[in-house]
Amino acid sequence: MPLFDRYIAVDWSAEAKKKKGPDSIWIADASRGANGIRLAESVNPGTRSETMLIVAARIRESRTRGERMVIGFDFPFGYPAGAAEKLSGSPNWRSLWQGIGALIHDADDNANNRFDVASDLNMRLSAKGYLYWGHPEGRSYDRLRPTRAGLDYSEIAEKRLAERGSTAKPVWQLSGGGNVGGQALTGIARLEALRREFGEVLSVWPFETDFERRLDQPVTLVEIYPTIFTRDERMLPKDRGQVEAVAHGFAELDAKGRLGELLSAPASLGDAERAAIMREEGWIAGMGHDALRRSVSLPRPKHMTRPSAQPYLRDPDAIYARSFATIRAEADLSHLSPALHDVAIRMIHACGMVDLAADIVGSPDIVAAVMQSLGKGGAILCDCEMVRAGIIRRTLPLDTDLIVTLNDPAVPDLAKSLGTTRSAAAVELWRPRLENSIAVIGNAPTALFHLIEMLEAGAPRPAAIIAAPVGFVGAAESKALLVASGFPIPFVTVTGRRGGSAIASAAFNAISKGAWA
């Protein structure tokens, strides 16, 4: 007999503001019927509050129908052994959930205090005061380091048993790619509130169910991992495809009478390991049952049966108009001067990431500075060919010079003599044209670092700087240095690691577009 009638999977997010689309919350909902598995249209709520209202409504709906349901959330339900007692005073998951639920404040607009909570909890966890790590650039916390470097996990493990030997991120990581620390803090707090609301009908796997042995409550909460089943690559964004694969996979295995097997404890677990899992660590559904996970078929939702039949815009002007209208509706530009709104919109349009808006910083007078420079014959100095290729030539005065020095024959030897990169050495060759120029950097952090060093040493000042170097080493730091430099030079940049030639040239094009015949 099947264990459940309805299967819900939730892709979680710790985002600090309302967000939809990729890298946000998605909810998939599947059920079994006479004609097989039905996968309902997935929903994309913009906030955690809205998400939990939807989940609660579906629980009530299923209770009215007499259905039994399983709900999967993709964040850790527990912490490595020993953490619960230090965080909450008791060595069990219930105390941990209650403690986190009391500390996390998560507003309806997604604003939350997860970094402050992690900073405070670090002192409880370790005599050295550091296990959680990671925080937004430009902020500082008393007991929260920006990176993992130098942290000691000898007292409490870095990963739970379920995560060891896998690519899953540790619960202590609060920022960076694939981090789950903020998701665990905000998610556990929300599930603790759900337990208080539906405690009499709800159980948490595997803590209260002893893995598959007591799946007898009307509602079971399960920890899932986004890639537990293979997703349909045609389904975008991938977050949506992943939760639809989970909901469908649960339903398919249950129809075959094998979902209990997926939720069972792997035979490889020893008694001590199982005890730690049941007491406080939790487990990930399907972990240790790889062959069974791979046996599940891809979901075939009705709304994907004829993708080619969907209408799409063909008029370029209409496409641009709708794109920019979408960005204006979804991006929060309130922190920027109105003079920079068009610039920010073009930068977002170049990368397709609405949340880039929060990282854009600039001087309101950069538009006037660029136009004045072009009117006086100022050159455009580009750090690479991709930036130059992205600049729309027809919007410029006919005699404007677009200069790239990266491939100058003198650059390799100059880089060796200066002990730096070719990109930085190429900027050294800008000196004769720097005054009244527009510097556009979209690739190399070292190019921006060297430009700042030259200006600090008294080099001629450009009229404006557009800086969007990209990468994991030096990109965020070089742009932070530009913002903090205090040069009387108008600039626009995108803080953090993101950037690139397309974003840099888009920022320039937004300023110059249509100004010249």
Image: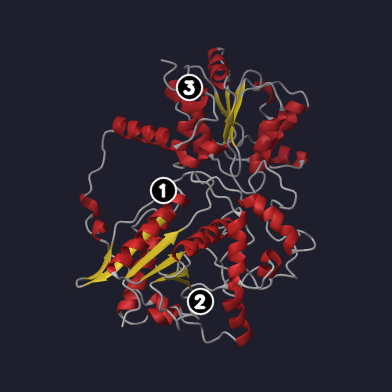
Which labelled disc corresponds to residue 21?
1
Q: Nearer the viewer, residue 15 or 213?
A: 213
Q: Mark 1 Cα within 10 Å, few/some/many (few <14, many 20+)?
A: some
* Residue 404, horizontal then vertical, whole percent: 58, 31
User: Of the residues under marks 1 and 2, which one precedes in the sequence?
Assistant: 1
Residue at image position (61%, 21%) is 437
Q: Kindly state the secondary structure of the residue where label 1 is placed.
A: loop
Please say whether residue 167 is visible from this viewpoint. Answer: yes
Identify the colour scheme used: secondary structure
What is the distance, in whole Å, between disc 1 and disc 3 at their CAs? Answer: 31 Å
| CA gap, disc 2 and disc 3 | 63 Å
Of labels 2 and 3, the one closer to you? 2
State which mark lies toward you, 1 or 2. 2
Q: Label 3 belongs to which residue?
A: 512
- Which of marks 3 and 2 precedes in the sequence? 2
- Give how far across and how far down residue 363 sits, in percent: 60, 24
Query: In the rendered structure, which amino acid carries the disc numbered 2?
Result: Glu
To which quarter of the image does residue 100 belong?
bottom right
- In space, the residues marked 1 and 2 are separated at their CA atoms by 34 Å
Residue 23 visible in this rendered orientation of the protein = no
Q: Badge 3: how crowded within 10 Å, few (<14), some, or many (20+)?
A: many
Q: Amino acid at mark 3?
A: Ser
The residue to which callout 2 is attached is 208
Judge by depth and name the residue closer to the eye, 205 or 480: 205
| CB within 8 Å, label 2 to label 3 | no
Q: Is residue 48 above or below residue 297?
A: above
Q: Quadrant of residue 170?
A: bottom right
Q: Identify the residue at horizontal 74%, vertical 52% (top origin).
A: 143
Q: Secondary structure at mark 2?
A: loop
**Left or right placement of residue 243 versus residue 477 in this view:** left
Q: Residue at x 62, y 73 (%)?
A: 92
Mark 3 or mark 1, which is nearer the start of the sequence? Answer: 1
